[in-house]
Amino acid sequence: MPDIIQLLPDSIANQIAAGEVIQRPASVVKELLENALDADSTFIRLIIKDAGKTSIQVIDDGKGMSETDARMAFERHATSKIKSANDLFCIKTMGFRGEALASVAAIAHVETVTRQAVVDLATRIIIEGSEIITHDKCQGSVGTSITVKNLFYNVPARRKFLKSDPVELKHIMDEFHRVALANPDVYFTFHHNGNETYHLPKANLKQRVVGIFGKNINDKLVPISEETEVAVFSGLIGKPDAAKKTQGDQFIFVNKRYIRSNYLNHAIRAAFEDLITKDVFPAYYIFLEIDPANIDINVHPTKTEIKFEDERLIYNYLRVSVKHSLGQYSVTPMIDFSIDHNFNHRYSGGNATDEKNSLNTYHPEIEAKFRPGQESVRGWEEIYRSLSDNRSVSNTSRNAEVSILESEAYKTEGTGNFHNYASREPYQLHLSYIIHQVKTGMMMIDQQAAHERILYEQYLEILQSGEYSSQKELFPRTVELDPAKSSVLKNILDKVRGLGFEIEDFGHNTFIVHGTPCPLENNANIENIIDHLISQYVNNLEFELGIEDNLARSMSVSSGLKSGKKLDKQEMTALIDMLFACKMPNKSPSGKKCFIIFELDEINKRFNQL
Ligand code: ADP
Ligand code: MG
């Protein structure tokens, strides 16, 4: 048998290795920006075309490379940043693996022009699929410009799996935000398809946050600053009222490196305690400075995870620091609205079995009955009929009504009218749920989920039929968005008009609203709704729902009724009627149950339990 093992040619080895480092255009952006920072640049320009699929260019004014280094930089494991294994424990640069440029050059067309201050001419190197095409001298300013074109041109499978331009652009923006936030003392600009999306001169952290996320956040930030023996904590935290429904502006950096850590996120969240409700996310931009010897950044190839020597200590210090700064800036507590535990406590007997049997538990049989599809619609109609049919009360439910009538609670607050109390009038529980009698027992409706379902179907219908109507604003309203959201809105302005917004682009990230969709309330906060609409829309891009579905969902969330809003009887009845007029009333567009039914049999059983 002949020997069959052979070494892979470098170009193939590089292509395979590239998969680890470069997943999408945003990975190239991250690597190029980090290299520019490591070269001590003070001004960095990022210029991209077609969400990075056509071209990504980073121009810096850093120290540049010598002619030999410029060639070496594209070899695998070629780095100027570490020399020995010991150096791994005191890394101060962003890069250190010497893999990025070799990886990029294996799967794209790369042009580098670089010049050091001590020489007159720049070196130019063009590499395509790890092969040097050109290596010569040219005019060029001090620093480095690297242009990466046609990413994955030789790996069609990967190119095919790239997402749509808006999704890839969002990933690029995320990387850009992280790098720009961690380095406010560096001047950054960002152009996409010829438009300047960000212009961020050297600034302090707060100015940088405002430059990226818009002026609205300016007065909602409190500083954090704490020195402990394990780390120095600094940065900014959003006040509780700046917390948002969508996860987004949460940044933790360790030695200027953006990291992902559910553990540390939890520490910050814990510091907010009951200052915010469970369904919102606080904003924060927090920096930890730790002796590099006490962390290991070598755990993940794309380096967003990190290991700390004493994670628990850091957790505690972080929690206390955030708490301290929230307290110091006397952020007044809001009323906690998390109704869940109260509800559970009231109905469960306290032991594990009772907890399981609690009225709040999931009922697979009921769930199965109302799964989307034709059958569910039939199931619906039955329930809906029974809502108005309050005279045909079954024996079991009559018993239940009698027990309610005889209860203390009823005697004190009851109306004395059997039908009014027992069957017709909905009742709002903890300003979040509506309780209503149905033929087979009791229905509990989640007002927020239900309203989202109603609005989603309404807006989808409006968008699909093209028949929208607007209510004119007496005084046009001005909406100012941050640069990222503003560029998204510009791209989908026509569709947003299709919802019923009469809206114009006024330049400088500002929009004028002359009219609003009819389903909106008169006193709605238009600025918040549009801001929230765009963040929802961007978050949903990942799911590739199609623009109309996405907008309808986003609109239902941004303008929907929230838990915590008091509803009068008429509003509750209208909500129930509208919910059951929906095509799929059982779930909100994001999959949350709109209602739960508690069967009388189940209720009786529980009362009869010893
Ligand atoms: P790493 O950053 O891990 O060292 P890279 O492949 O990203 O590996 O870069 C290889 C080397 O090329 C770097 O160590 C650095 O010396 C040089 N280099 C890359 N980009 C730049 C730049 N923008 N300016 C100066 N030198 C650079
Ligand atoms: Mg690098």
Image (tube, rainbow, N blue to C red):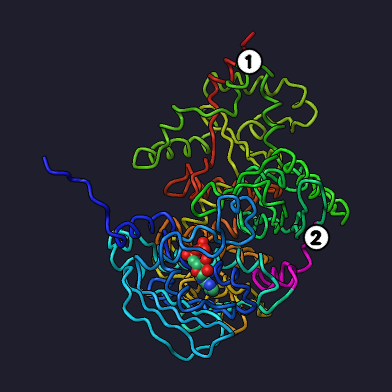
- Place residue 3 in its image quadrant: top left
Image height check: is 424 above or below 37? above
User: Which residue is nearer to you in this view: 131 or 354?
Assistant: 131
Q: Main structural element of the magenta stretch: helix, strand or loop?
A: helix
* Count of numbered circles in the view: 2
In this orientation, which residue lies closer to the viewer: 392 or 533? 533
The x and y percentages for residue 401 are 63, 23
State the mark number for residue 607: 1
Q: Disc 1 marks which amino acid? A: Phe
Magenta run includes residue 325: no
Q: Is residue 93 above or below residue 498?
A: above
Which residue: 54% across, 57% down?
556
Where is residue 178? Give x, y as percent: 60, 63
Q: Quadrant of the C terminus?
A: top right
Compare residues 32 and 474 and report the one nearer the observer.
32
Residue 41 image point, x, y percent? 62, 76
Label 2 SS: strand
Residues shaded magenta: 204-224
Q: Is residue 30 visible?
A: no
Q: CA distance from mark 2 to mark 1?
A: 51 Å
Answer above or below: position of 123 versus 159: below
Q: Residues within 10 Å of mark 1 (few under 14, many from 20)?
A: few
Q: Residue at x 62, y 83 (%)?
A: 508
Q: Quadrant of residue 344?
A: top right
The label on residue 446 is: none
Question: Disc 2 marks which residue?
Answer: 222
Q: Is residue 466 visible?
A: yes
Query: Which is more N-terminal, label 1 or label 2?
Result: 2
Choose between 443 and 240: the one closer to the eye: 240
- Quadrant location, the N terminus: top left
Compared with residue 516, is residue 583 higher up or lower down, i.e. above or below?
above
